[in-house]
């Protein structure tokens, strides 16, 4: 587990850039946190790092958006899903195929329907307006093997660990 003290939106984007540096095709990232805590901001920084040129917005009302960069990015928001059965409508297994990466906001709500191998990134409000505590947790062998590289990238960017 890695904990980062992000004092600005720029720090959140740099954290996303570090994650993007170690991403592999087929990866799943769960974004967890209160409304406005930084899930979409992280996705914006992540997408920019992978060469997405269009604006990345929250898919709260559409449930899913797709962006093209060096990998295809599936960005889902499952906040409005009430029943785990509704997850079937999202065709999740197909999202993990091909040259893609999937980020799911509120992904902890549907964890039982997701692959065990994923990265979970939690966002908590800090003491100042733009400050956030970002906790990165690896789940599964694929992500566990990349955590040292992620730590090194974060340190190289000067992001302060807690």
Image (cartoon, helix red, strand yellow):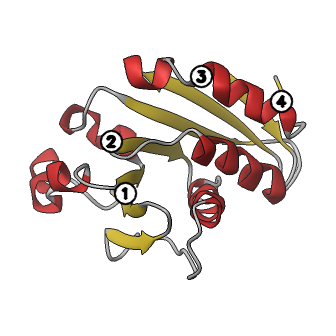
At x 37% / y 72%, what residue is drawn? 65
At x 56% / y 82%, what residue is drawn? 54
**Frontmost residue, 3 versus 49:** 49
Q: How many numbered marks, from 0 up?
A: 4
Residue identifier under label 4: 155
How much space separates mark 4 and mark 2, taking CA atoms? 31 Å
Mark 1 or 4, closer to the camera: 4
**Residue 153 occupies which quadrant of the picture?**
top right
Mark 2 or 3, closer to the camera: 3
Residue identifier under label 3: 147
Q: Secondary structure at mark 1?
A: loop
Q: Earlier in the sequence, mark 1 or mark 4?
A: 1
Residue identifier under label 1: 79
**Residue 41 occupies which quadrant of the picture?**
bottom right
Q: Earlier in the sequence, mark 2 or mark 1?
A: 1
Mark 1 packing: few (<14 Cα in 10 Å), some, or many (20+)?
some
How much space separates mark 2 and mark 3, taking CA atoms? 24 Å
Location of residue 17 in the rendering, given as x and y in whole percent from the top left corner: 68, 50
Q: Is residue 96 above or below residue 56?
A: above
Which quadrant is the N terminus positioned in? top right
Q: Is residue 147 above or below residue 57?
A: above
Q: Earlier in the sequence, mark 4 or mark 2?
A: 2
Q: Which mark is residue 109?
A: 2
Q: Earlier in the sequence, mark 4 or mark 3?
A: 3
At x 19% / y 38%, what residue is drawn? 113
How much space separates mark 2 and mark 1, taking CA atoms? 8 Å
């Amino acid at each position: 587990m890695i904990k980062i003290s992000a004092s600005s939106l720029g720090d959140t984007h740099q954290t996303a850039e570090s994650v993007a540096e170690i991403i592999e095709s087929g990866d799943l990232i769960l974004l967890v946190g209160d409304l406005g805590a930084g899930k979409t901001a992280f996705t914006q920084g992540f997408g920019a790092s992978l060469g997405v040129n269009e604006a990345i917005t929250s898919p709260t009302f559409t449930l899913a958006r797709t962006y093209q960069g060096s990998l295809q990015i599936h960005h889902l928001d499952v906040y409005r899903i009430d029943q785990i059965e509704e997850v079937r409508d999202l065709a999740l297994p197909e999202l993990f195929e091909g040259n893609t990466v999937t980020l799911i906001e509120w992904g902890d709500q549907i964890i039982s329907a997701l692959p065990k191998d994923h990265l979970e990134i939690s966002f908590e409000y800090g003491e100042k307006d733009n400050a956030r505590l970002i906790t990165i947790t690896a789940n599964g062998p694929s992500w566990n093997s990349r955590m040292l590289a992620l730590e090194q990238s974060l340190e190289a960017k000067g992001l302060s660990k807690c």
